[in-house]
Image: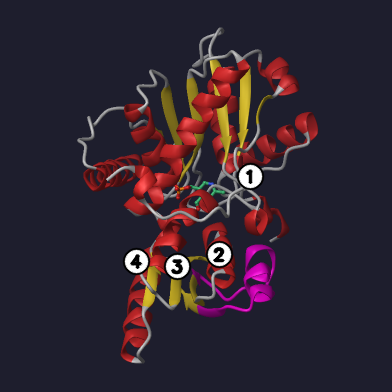
Amino acid sequence: MEITDFPKLNLSNLPTPLTRLERISQYLNHNIYIKRDDLTGFCFGGNKTRKLDYLIAEAVEKGYDSLIAVGAYQSNFCRMAAGAGTATGLEVHLVLGGAKDPAKATGNLLLDTILGVTIHKVYDSDWDVWTEAALSLQQELIDSGKKPYYLPIGGSVPVGVLGYINGLKEILDQSKRMGIEIDKIIHASSSGGTQAGLVLGKQIYKWPGEIIGIGVAKNEVQLNSEIRELCNSTSEMLGFKFHNEGINVDCSYLGDEYGARTDEASEAIELFAQKEGIFLDNVYTGKAAAGLIDYAKKNRFKQNENILFLHTGGNIELFE
Ligand SMILES: Cc1ncc(COP(=O)(O)O)c(C=O)c1O
């Protein structure tokens, strides 16, 4: 099957801008560009709308009547999934987890509340426990006669991965129009779907550059193997073989755990805001930008290379 054979919504406002970060380039003494996927628009935007364009279209086409999405209280994915499900007439259930009940609904959780979806809280920080709760909710809904569409953490399933195969093509088309060649793309990687799409796009469009996923949730072995699995299952769905090349993850900027604040991310957030007027977040893009800054300062990028920071959104978290 070709990508164009899959049903697709147009929640994402595309193409998102690709521009040069003049003041950060000057400060880091490297050529730094940004792809503004924080500006995909729908429900405050972010990388997940590219996945949801395909996922929700599949749910609608296959006649599902309800939706279950799983994530942390401040999940960007769940916020956008809730909006997409609501806007297409699905009954939305969010299974949201974390060690303790947030005293007040802020940030993404506040937006979920305004969207009016049903929230099921799981008082545990273990992602597997959230998934178990979501699967038992799925069974309950089926038993009550519903047909729920299940979205795992981050929407990282083959149909969702299609969004970032297109994302890579969009980057290649834009950079060509600008008369530049991007050598490296660096971005936050968590459930792996974004990176899997980029890596498959690299193979499909024969882009010689490098993709660096800054891991913000898991260890390198686990993240690498999850991305590989997604690349294999997505390429199988599309009818070609994944060459098993180009998966590059670096979890050095994760800090103590998923969501834990780091000084490097805080500095990156301030740098992007103060030099470029661009907001990042503490959980994803701040850590990815901390990686970008560190690589540049340690000259792990070559002087003449064009580096693209993929801004995946998430800045609602600043209002937590
Ligand atoms: C803002 C932001 N950036 C990056 C990611 C990572 O994307 P993926 O889960 O596809 O690896 C997420 C996932 O939740 C996110 O919300």
**Residues under labels 2 and 1: Cα distance?**
16 Å
Query: Is 34 drawn above or below residue 137 in the view shown?
Result: above
Q: Position of residue 222 (x, y in %)?
A: 30, 46
Say which of marks 4 and 3 sits in front. 3
Q: Amino acid at mark 1?
A: Asp
**Outermost residue to the front:** 5
For residue 173, which numbered disc appears in the image?
none
Say which of marks 3 and 2 sits in front. 2
205 sits left or right of 101 in the view? left
**Which residue is identified by label 2?**
84
Query: Is 139 drawn above or below residue 274 in the view shown?
Result: below
Q: Are marks 1 and 3 in contact (CB under 8 Å)?
A: no
> Mark 4 or 1 closer to N-term?
1
Q: Nearer the viewer, residue 264 or 4?
A: 4
Is residue 103 in sight in this rendering?
no
Q: Position of residue 49 (x, y in %)?
A: 54, 53
**Outermost residue to the top:** 304
Element on which disc 2 rests: helix
**Which residue is identified by label 1?**
38
Element on which disc 4 rests: helix
**Residues under labels 2 and 4: Cα distance?**
25 Å
> Mark 4 or 3 closer to N-term?
3
Colour mode?
secondary structure
